[in-house]
Image (cartoon, grey):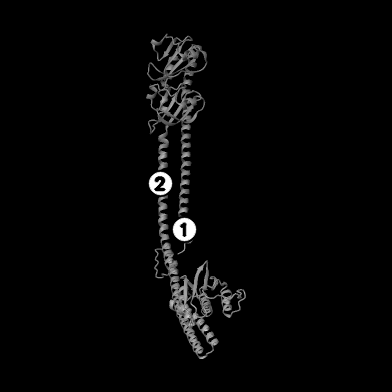
Amino acid sequence: MPQISGKSFKIHIFIYLAGFVILALLIAFSALIATNRVYRDNIRQEIAILSKTLAQTVDRFFMQPEEYIKDVRNHINLIHTAPGTRDINCFIDDVLNIFSGFDSIYLLDPDGTVLDTWPFNSDLIGIDLSGQEYISTTVLEDQVYWSDSFLSQQTGLPTIALSLRSDQGILAAFYNLRELSNFVSVSFPDPDEFIAIIEGDGNIIGHTYPERVLLLENLGNMNSFRQARAGNSGISEDRYLDVKGLVSVHQAEHSGFYVMVFKSYSRIFGRMNLIYSLLLLLLLSVSLTFAVLVLILIHRVMRPIDDLIDKIAQVSSGSYDVAVHSRYSEFDELISSFKMMVNRIDERENDLRQSLTDKDTLLRELYHRTKNNMQIIAGLMSLYGRKYSQEAVSGFIEEIQTKIQAISLVHEKLYSTGNLSKIGLKEYIEDLIPLVVTSLSKGSGSIRYNLDIEDVNLLIDYAVPCGLILNELITNSVKYAFPDNADGEITIYAGIRDNMLDLQYSDSGTGFPESFDTGKIESLGLLLLSNIVRNQLRGEMDISSPGGVLYRIKIPLGFYSPRV
């Protein structure tokens, strides 16, 4: 069956399917990337909002003790300027009871000597605290001063001193920071996550885990904190105790402290990455399953088509006993039409085969009867030849008889071989020569025949003229080439070269007379020969006489074609 060039339906389906799966994966992957980006931005925004809100809360937290110490200062100043005002001890005791963040309040003279304490502690009266930083700084500034944190000798807790000038000297309040940790006391699922309130030097004064404050931990070496101190507050990636995290640091505007929110990178994005990986794996699994299902479906759909193609190939090779089945109703009509077509083709081929058989029989009978008729005519010619004694008439009848026998031999070969269009050239010439020689060589010498004939088949349209050509050539040689019963030799070559029949005939006889002009053929036999070769067969003929006679004949074989 010839190969038909074209595009494969299966390959087309596979390409479309692969394109669809790749497109779906790209869309899903892009969606995952976009979702991941939105998720990361939301996390960053949440952390930033949390740190900023806590920074504002810390400011509000430290604004309250400022207000209280200012009220205490104003009250002390009022007592000295307005006698009869409520006792200062009662007022400060009320402040300490109401605002539990204050551990104690000191009143110092301008030189830094303790004048009074609340609650009262006689051991502290008269102590010189002028060496403390908050004392010296307060003397120079007329505002509330916040000291760095330190561990109180009385409570052992992180404490900050608030101090400001009063009319009597300096008022100092010691504010413990245990309440500060309440703002950052958040339960995190990961112990590496925390919120910390940090001083300017990096010391922790409030932490999700208060023990970190007691350990006087310092976060000043973290890049995110250093950037915040440089004025670049925001979100960044940083490490704390070799744990990678997402960090947001904001400074409280009023108090100057920093709020740091540290979220574990692995917890925030690890779970998300795991979800993304699972989603991607699920998508790949679904795509692969879909592809397998589609390929199975294509295979099931293509199976009846492939079966139909195989059956068509069988029909094209001549086998019409085919059976096609399908599981799908959509193919039933196609298969039914195919079966009807095969049945019709089978019927028509049977009709054609019967017709060809009839024609073959008729043509064989025609060849057989033609041969018989030719033999009857040859017999009649022979009877008439014996009846008339004139040598010219007898010779003419013999020549006609040999020509009829040459034509009759062609039909006999066609009838006997079963090929109604062609005969074997070698066998035909080998059988033709004895017929011609037997009828013409009475009273002549011994003639030897050298044959070099290729075993090729020749159409009847070429075989009959070739038989007449050889008949005429042999007749001329037997009659004229060997006078006085001389012995002789005839050589015949026939073959096909470049789709040309190459026929060469020569004898060892006397040849043509010197006066013979090959360009002016006047002999009836040679005129018949020239007419057959040049006019009927569109060929070429060259005659020479190099000691005997030589005919070179070339006949093109493309003029006639098989008709049976």
Q: Is residue 376 above or below residue 56?
A: below
**Mark 1 vs mark 2, CA separation in Å:** 30 Å
Q: Residue at x 49, y 73 (%)?
A: 491
What residue is disc 2 on?
282
Q: Residue 53, percent across and down?
A: 47, 30
Q: Residue 114, percent across and down?
A: 44, 10
What residue is disc 1 on?
9
Disc 2 crowd rating (10 Å Cα; few below 14, some 14-19, many 20+) is: few
Asked whether the viewer can see residue 91, the reply is no
Front one among 553 and 325: 553
Front one among 550 and 185: 550
Front one among 159 and 549: 549
Q: Residue 77, percent across and down?
A: 50, 14
Disc 1 crowd rating (10 Å Cα; few below 14, some 14-19, many 20+) is: few
Q: Residue 293, percent across and down?
A: 40, 54
Work out which residue is located at the far bottom of the displayed protein and give it.
Answer: 387
Give the residue type at disc 2. Answer: Leu
Which element carries disc 1, helix, strand or loop? helix
Asked whether the viewer can see residue 351, the reply is yes
Q: Is residue 137 above or below residue 293?
A: above
Give the residue type at disc 1. Answer: Phe
